[in-house]
Structures are given as structure tokens and as C-alpha cells.
Amino acid sequence: MSTVVDPIGLPEVDPAEVPDFDHARAEAAVRELLLAIGEDPDREGLRDTPARVARAYAEVTAGLRMTPQEVLSTTFDLGHDEMVLVRDIELWSMCEHHLVPFTGVAHVGYIPADSGKITGLSKLARLVDVYAKRPQVQERLTTQVADSLMGILEAKGCIVVIEAEHLCMTMRGVRKAGARTITSAVRGQMHDAATRAEAMALIHSRR
Ligand SMILES: Nc1nc2c(ncn2[C@@H]2O[C@H](COP(=O)(O)OP(=O)(O)OP(=O)(O)O)[C@@H](O)[C@H]2O)c(=O)[nH]1
Ligand SMILES: [Zn+2]
């Protein structure tokens, strides 16, 4: 009997159920890691490292304690029902397999609801961060951003394209520097061939 594992099928994390970041526990874990690699965590240069690493992890996993609802809560009605696209949104996330960064850009476009419900442009970048600042895989990050636009903004359609380089493929393992992974999620009216072609043209224009 084989077990089917859906690598990106984890349920949405409910921030209300995520415990506060445990600095003491993170520091103790980093100290253990330093010991495990044969280092001396009490030597001058490493003495403050567990606390620094704990602070850094608190920052790069802050998305676990944020919701897309709070980010997209500011909306206004511009009566604009054409595509809005923000491209080249800088992205830093952390591969959940190796806990090393993957980095690149996200392009996020949507067609507003008939009501003309629009969100601030910065909120699209914040939405990417909600899902990027947690242990992730690129595929899930891409679909979560798209599903938020559809579910919360009630967009008529959306496209999310993420291009990223995974340090787990460059600094270690297969060591293929420069390999970029491209994922996309297309929803609703963005499936229309002409609309999608327009979005892709905007994403790739004047680089
Ligand atoms: N699909 C997908 N795979 C990822 C992502 N980030 C890392 N991976 C891959 O996850 C896989 C984990 O493979 P394993 O064989 O369990 O781990 P490993 O022995 O460290 O694999 P190598 O990286 O090939 O050395 C690797 O192929 C990674 O390239 C991601 O965002 N999406
Ligand atoms: Zn990895």
C-alpha cells in the first residue's frame, strides 16, 4: 500500500493557534546546533549568536502570526474594473525542507470585483510577505497569494507568478547556481487567453 503525500496540501495556518515566538527555546536550539557542528558557543565571536539567530528567525517567520485578512482589510472603491498588476515585488522566503532562503520576485495581478473593490498597491507586496515569511515551498506560496486575492478581495481573476532562486540548490546539494524556479497560479477571468497574454506581456515588458 502506498501513501499519497500532497506536498503543498497543508491546511492554512491559523495565526490564533500559532504560539508566540519562543526566544529562549530558539536560543537553546541554536546553542545545541553550534555544539553539534563542533563549535564552541561560548567563544567570543559566538557568545551572542544564539540570541541574534533567534531574533532573525522571529523576523523571517513573522508571517506565521499574520493573516491575509488583516493585510487586505483596507480597500476602497475606485470603480476601476481593469487589471491591476504589481510586478517585481522583492521576495525572501525560507525553504521548509532545508530552512535556507529562497529569493526572487513575485508578480501579482488581479481584476477587481464588479464593485470596483481595490486594495492599496503596497498591500499586494504585504500579502506576499504574509506567506513568504514562514517555512514554505514556492508552489504553496504562489497558490496562497492567488487564493487570498480571490477569496478576500473577491477579485474576478488573478495571476501570481513567482521567479526564485533556492539557496538549497546553490549553496549545497545539487549546486546549480543561477537556476530559477518559476511558478504561476491563474484564477477566474485571468484564464481568458487574451487577458492572460496581456498580463504576461506586462510582466515581461521592458526588463
Ligand atoms: N517543489 C519544491 N521543491 C523544493 C522547494 N524548495 C526545495 N525543494 C526541493 O525539496 C527537495 C527535498 O529533497 P530530499 O531528497 O528530501 O532532500 P535532499 O537530500 O536534501 O535533496 P537535495 O537537495 O537533492 O540534496 C529537493 O529536491 C529540493 O530541491 C520548493 O519550494 N518546491
Ligand atoms: Zn530547500
Image (cartoon, helix red, strand yellow):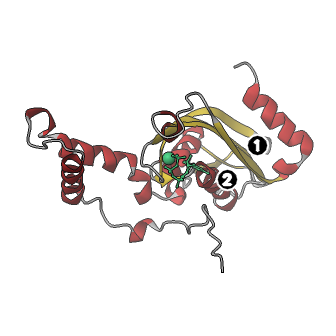
Which is nearer the eye, 70 or 58?
A: 58
Residue that sits furthest to the bottom in the current view:
1
From this viewpoint, is residue 107 visible? no
Residue at image position (21%, 46%) is: 34
In this view, the residue in front, 97 or 26, is 97
In this rendered view, identify the residue nearer to me: 73 or 78.
73
User: What residue is shown with label 2?
Assistant: 146
> Left of 163 or right of it: where is 23?
left
* Rendered position, 128 above or below 105: below
Question: Which residue shows up at 63% across the image and 52% down it?
Answer: 139
- Label for residue 80? 1
Q: Quadrant of residue 69?
A: bottom right
Q: Which mark is drawn over residue 47?
A: none
Secondary structure type for disc 2? helix
Residue 174 pos. (x, y %): 54, 38
Q: Amino acid at mark 1?
A: His
